[in-house]
Amino acid sequence: MRSLIATLALSLIACSSGRALALQRDHLTPQEADHVRDAQRIDKRIEVFIKAIDRRIEALQGQPQNASKKGQKEIEEWGEVKGTRADLIADIAGILDEAITNLDDAAERPPQKEFLPKALEKMAEAAKRYVAALRPLREQISDRRERESLEQAIEMAEQIIAAHQSHNGK
């Protein structure tokens, strides 16, 4: 568990320079932030972060949110994801940063520790999808700030995967 904490803490330090980019706007919709506050257990909170990132990946891939009744219901419950490609990538980096902070905090609190392995496994599986979705964007981005956010998001996702592998002795 200590190696998990050390790995995640290093990722926070490594990414602190990019935090200013992510803080320019809220990386969660108000409804998503409410879901985060409502999810007290770390595994449930990670599910919220995963859903929030998945929604931004879908937006990056051009999948319309409100194409169906289900999409409209989701917008009502989770808020509308909007912004430029740079905004969406910065949001993803910010959400990953928040997820790492929450995982790190849970490792220090006994009531949350029992849910940490499940939360880390879920986050690592999702992080693999995020790396696969974000890497191809490297070829499309020339703006320095957008590129920094992209690299930060990829790096944090890779660090989550590495922390999970380290935690499982792989």
Image (tube, rainbow, N blue to C red):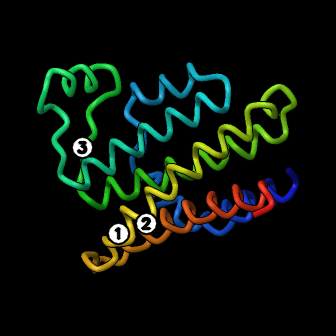
Badge 2 amino acid: Ser
Q: Which residue is mark 1?
A: 146
Q: Are marks 2 and 3 in contact (CB under 8 Å)?
A: no
Residue farthest to the front, as pictured: 170
Seen at 73% across and 41% down, the residue is: 117
Judged from the image, the secondary structure of the residue bearing numbered disc 2 is helix
Seen at 26% across and 59% down, the residue is: 85
Q: Mark on residue 82?
A: 3
Disc 3 from disc 1: Cα separation: 16 Å
Seen at 47% across and 56% down, the residue is: 93
Q: Nearer the viewer, residue 129 or 154?
A: 129
Badge 3 amino acid: Lys
- How packed mark 1 is, by other alpha carbons closer than 10 Å (few <14, some 14-19, many 20 or more), is some
**Quadrant showing the C terminus:** bottom right
Residue 1, percent from left and from top: 85, 50
- How packed mark 2 is, by other alpha carbons closer than 10 Å (few <14, some 14-19, many 20 or more), is many
Q: Mark on residue 149?
A: 2
